[in-house]
Image: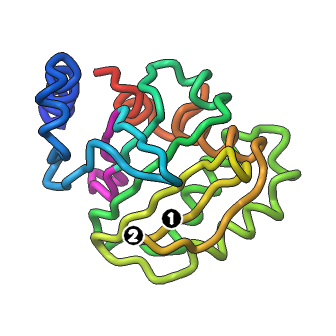
Amino acid sequence: MIAKKIVLGLTLIISALFSSEAIAQKQIVFEGVTIPRTMKFENKTLQLNGAGSRSKMWVEVYIQALYLSQLSQNPKEIINDNVEMSIRIEITSALVSSGKLTRAINAGFEKSAGDTFESFKPRMELLKGFLADEITKGDVYELTYSPADTSIWIIKNGELKGKIPGFDFKKVFFGIWLGDKPVDEDLKNNLLGIF
């Protein structure tokens, strides 16, 4: 797995150094999953900042990628920026269910929110509803922040499931993976492009 992360890191670095190559290469393959180099959101183009895998009990459960309007390795700036950004999650295991994904995000959110978690509970219930559909291997979630309406858009396989309002929610939400107490330190570094 470390070797695969190094290969991904080298791919991103080489593409950044050779802009013509970066333009020509519209996607990369990471652990068998094709990851787009860019994504469109509300007429904006977001760039792949980094990607990594999340595992539970030695089983890879999803591949996650971070997309930003401007590449960054500063997690605090990313969390506090009021600009378009997105977390893309592709499910890679049939073991992932809606309940398991919801519980994992809820636990990460509680860790990120700390003492303020109670104030976010109504919006976490919204999120739970938006993630209630059955999950199958290959499903793709785009959890995208829109500064235009200060909300997180929950998109599954290209279909908007709903929006969760609040810049305060956005900061805690992205803190799940990028905060001081991330759910996975290696994944945080991979999303930041630090290998």
Tell me what residue is drawn at x 34 percent, y 25 percent.
193
Give the residue type at disc 1. Leu
Query: What secondary structure is found at the residue carrying circle 1?
Result: helix
Please give the count of numbered marks on the rendered protein.
2
The numbered disc on residue 101 is 1
Q: Which residues are magenta?
A: 50-63
In the rendered view, tell whether residue 78 sits above or below residue 99: above
Task: Mark yes or no: residue 14 visible.
Answer: yes
Query: What secondary structure is found at the residue carrying circle 2?
Result: loop
Give the quadrant of residue 175.
top right
Is the C-beta separation of discs 1 and 2 under 8 Å? Answer: yes
Tell me what residue is drawn at x 42 percent, y 25 percent.
71
Q: Mark 2 packing: few (<14 Cα in 10 Å), some, or many (20+)?
A: some
Tell me what residue is drawn at x 28 percent, y 67 percent.
93
**Mark earlier in primary sequence (1, 2):** 2
Farthest bottom residue? 134
| Residue 129 point in image, percent of width and height | 66, 76
